[in-house]
Amino acid sequence: MWKFVTFLRRNITTSSCRRCKQDSLFTIHPHVKEALADHKPVVALESTIITHGMPYPYNFSTAKEVEAIVRAEGAIPATVGILEGRIHVGLSTDELDFLAQSKTAQKVSRRDLPYVISQGLSGGTTVSGTMIAAHKAGIPVFVTGGIGGVHRDGENTLDVSADLTELGRTPIAVVSAGVKSILDIGRTLEFLETQGVCVATYGDSKSFPAFFSQKSGFDSPFHVSTSTLSLGLQSGLLFAVPIPEEHAATGQQIEEAIQTAVAEASLKGVMGRDVTPFILQRVNELTKGKSLQANIALIHNNAKVGSWIACALAERSEKHGNSFRGVIKNKKSKEQKMASRAVVIGGINVDFIAKGTAKELVFGQTNPGVVCQSFGGVGRNIADCLSRLGCKPLFISAIGKDSHSEAVLNYCKHMDTSAVARLQDQRTATYCAVITESGELSLGLGDMDIHQQIQEQYVSEFEDQLSSASLIICDGNIPVSTIDYICCVAKQHTVPVWFEPTDTDKACKPFLSESWKALAYASPNLSELCTINRTLQLPTPSEIPRSLEDVLSWAVALSRPLLAHLQCVMKGQLCAVHYPALPVRSEETVNVSGAGDSFAAAVMVGILQGLDTQICVQMGLLAARFSLLSTHPIDQSLTLDTVLPDAFCLHQSLEPRCVWMED
């Protein structure tokens, strides 16, 4: 269906950026630079785990997942790597993929930096290399898997990782899963004490973890569940985070494999920097992939904890006017901070998508096809997409206390679902869609009665968040009275509202009263636009036009009376702009249930960032394309980098076309 967005411009702008220090050998990604300028929490991430820690494509997918987790927890990820002799703090998706597939990438510690840079080489930075880059950029928190340490027999070989001396000289908080058991953990802790490094286990126990195991047999001097980093010491902090309980059960099997791999390394004469990659590969082989799964799980967990620390540090910096390094001062008011958050009110569905594989579907009999389960709902889709694009909204919705609810909440862990009500004796909404081999929706069935429980009385519990929001988004699933209440609050506090009609029958809801005049944006397709006009008793076509010319003509005619009632001032001649969709072949189309929601959410992100209309729409078109190619309504690999204009240029697109409206 044709999709339209009606814009009422509010003065939504991003804050100004300060210029980050950068020289000819040092590049800070624009998103990281802006976050540092705005004193937002930033988490540095190493890249040797990409270049040397895991095989492709697990290294690439894990890198993207870790960055997504950091964003979902409210921080900005900054993966550090070296590309053709330049240190990069923050990598694009293409740059991550380049390092993940590189066969010649170097392993770059402090010692290796001068050579690698002077020779124009590329590589993954170790803990020490990443700490140097992060400190130079002004990032106080760094997440890794595990740090290096004193090797076994290190008292004779003097084989001690540069990670330990870097912790003694660079004021960075390093979040890791402790030290791998292939090392001498006791001597490693002694060395860190000599270097003056504060070591603390994150949690309720002092037990120092050994990467794959929650306990190493040694204790940290301290244990913490929160942190403050304000002493200005010129040494780092090491937070040791135990592997999650559900993955620790395989620890004994992995430990036995480690001992076998250590013995093999000794027999084969593997030494120095080659020891760790050799042992990790052998352990993965011996455990049939279980160690890789545990490795990914602990890295995900470390990313969450590191993001919490970064967010707490940023909040403390704002409150007290200082930071770990004592140089960052946040001048934003509490009101400005609160106003930076969007709120989404709408439905959650458990989706069952069936795609036929024959040319035509024949009703009344079983058709061959592929069936998959995913999680949808217009409101949930939009909140999901916003979260993956770095704008984590408060999501207000309702689910039942049934077999689907836990699965829904577990899938939505990257979102803020604290305002999702769990209702006794109610069924979580379900939706079944049957799509043809060419990707068109043939039939949809929905059990969505629970959406009527998202009532004004419940939503009003979050009035403070609504009144201070940067943008309120509501879908057509919620009751009319709830939409009326939302529009009333928004109008009182001058908060822009985006209405997503959801379907033809529900598109009329805000237009049954004067509530619609509080709307800033709407994203109807042509059928929904006709419903809106009929509700307002305006002329509408009896049949939906088919040709592009007629569609554009009717879109202009149907939109104009709506714009005339919106509270905005227009200068000059008004025009409608048609942006052709990015090409997707029918055989590539997997899921049609989330493309419109992906489009809308990406446009919202662009608006909140103060970008111009064309860039916002380009972001939306890219997000929609990702959705069509994914088994999920919102593609799980979606990030802000993947929908920015640079990414748009990689796809063939037609020029937008203007249709001018007569006065």
Image (cartoon, rainbow, N blue to C red):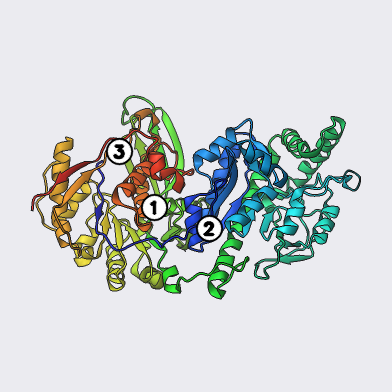
Residue labelled with disc 2 = 75
**How much space separates mark 3 and mark 1, taking CA atoms?**
19 Å
Q: Is residue 79 above or below residue 332?
A: above
For mark 1, does the 10 Å Cα neighbourhood hold few (<14), some (14 to 19), or many (20 or more) residues?
many
Q: Which residue corresponds to the image point at 44% horizontal and 56% vertical from the top-left?
A: 391
The kind of secondary structure element at disc 3 is loop
Q: How many marks?
A: 3
The kind of secondary structure element at disc 1 is helix
Residue 581 tag number: 3
- Disc nearer the start of the sequence (3/2): 2
| Dot in front, 3 or 1 | 3
The image shows residue 657 at horizontal and vertical percentages of: 21, 40
Q: Is residue 34 left or right of residue 13?
A: right
In the rendered image, the quadrant that contains the N terminus is: top left
Q: Which residue corresponds to the image point at 58% horizontal and 59% vertical from the top-left?
A: 138
Residue 382 tag number: 1
Residue 591: quarter of image? top left
